[in-house]
Image: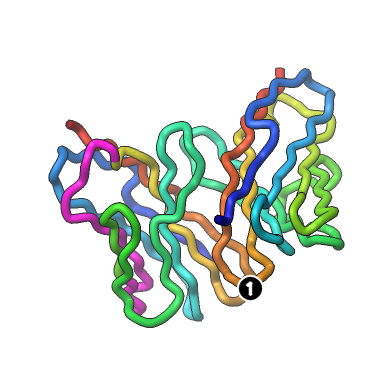
Amino acid sequence: AQSVSQHNHHVILSEAASLELGCNYSYGGTVNLFWYVQYPGQHLQLLLKYFSGDPLVKGIKGFEAEFIKSKFSFNLRKPSVQWSDTAEYFCAVIFNNAGNMLTFGGGTRLMVKP
Amino acid sequence: GAVVSQHPSWVICKSGTSVKIECRSLDFQATTMFWYRQFPKQSLMLMATSNEGSKATYEQGVEKDKFLINHASLTLSTLTVTSAHPEDSSFYICSARDSAGVVEQYFGPGTRLTVT
């Protein structure tokens, strides 16, 4: 069955540290890939998305993600995190045989220590 | 642009009563809306896909008679939790896809339901 997995459930970093959150999916066909962020008490916001083209996509707030098709991965990165990046991060995938249905990963809770 | 609202944002009801949650796309038309459920510290689980003018498509394990979905217009979908029980307490989130054909979904702020 198609699935999305985020291996890091909880990540704690100090400010200015670099961040990489893993996202893998299981599906051999075409995908659309998304990263969402949910700040405490707020709703989901789109950080970035990949549909086609350059596999390195840049999003808001200094985030970027790289689609590596051979590894079925779409990892999220940020070179230097800030305390305000404390939030939960969700990877989501639309599998092309599933209409427009988003399948979410389990989420990664990031805490950045000031 | 692309704002989705939900009402109410928070509701407490007694066991056995029904609760209606509204999801509105404020500045675009949405042929398709989605309803998710999020338990504390967990990810979003898709409950159903709501299509304007037709019956909703429910995911496996979601009781369609308990979670009634109506998508009566291109800007409004409602989720009614019938005969609510404490185990229905959760965070319900809707999203909407622009009818213009963009794949991206826009999320509402969510509704926290507590059943006592």
Residue drawn at the location 63% of the way across and 34% of the way down: B111
Q: What is the tally of numbered marks visible in this picture?
A: 1
Q: Is residue A36 left or right of residue A56?
A: right
Query: Residue B30: x, y in percent?
Result: 70, 60
The answer to which of A113 and A95 lies nearer the viewer is A113
Q: Is residue A78 left or right of residue B42?
A: left
Check residue A68 for magenta coloring. yes
- Against B19, residue A104 (above or below) is below
The magenta region covers A67-84
Is residue A5 visible in the rendered image? The answer is: no
Residue drawn at the location 77% of the way across and 61% of the way down: B51
Q: Secondary structure at mark 1?
A: loop
| Type of amino acid at the residue the image marks with label 1 | Gly
Viewport quadrant of the N terminus of chain B? bottom right
The answer to which of A20 and A48 lies nearer the viewer is A48
The residue that label 1 is drawn on is B101
Viewport quadrant of the C terminus of chain B? top right
Residue drawn at the location 63% of the way across and 71% of the way down: A98
- Against B97, residue A45 (above or below) is above
Splitting the image into 4 quarters, where does residue B32 fall? bottom right
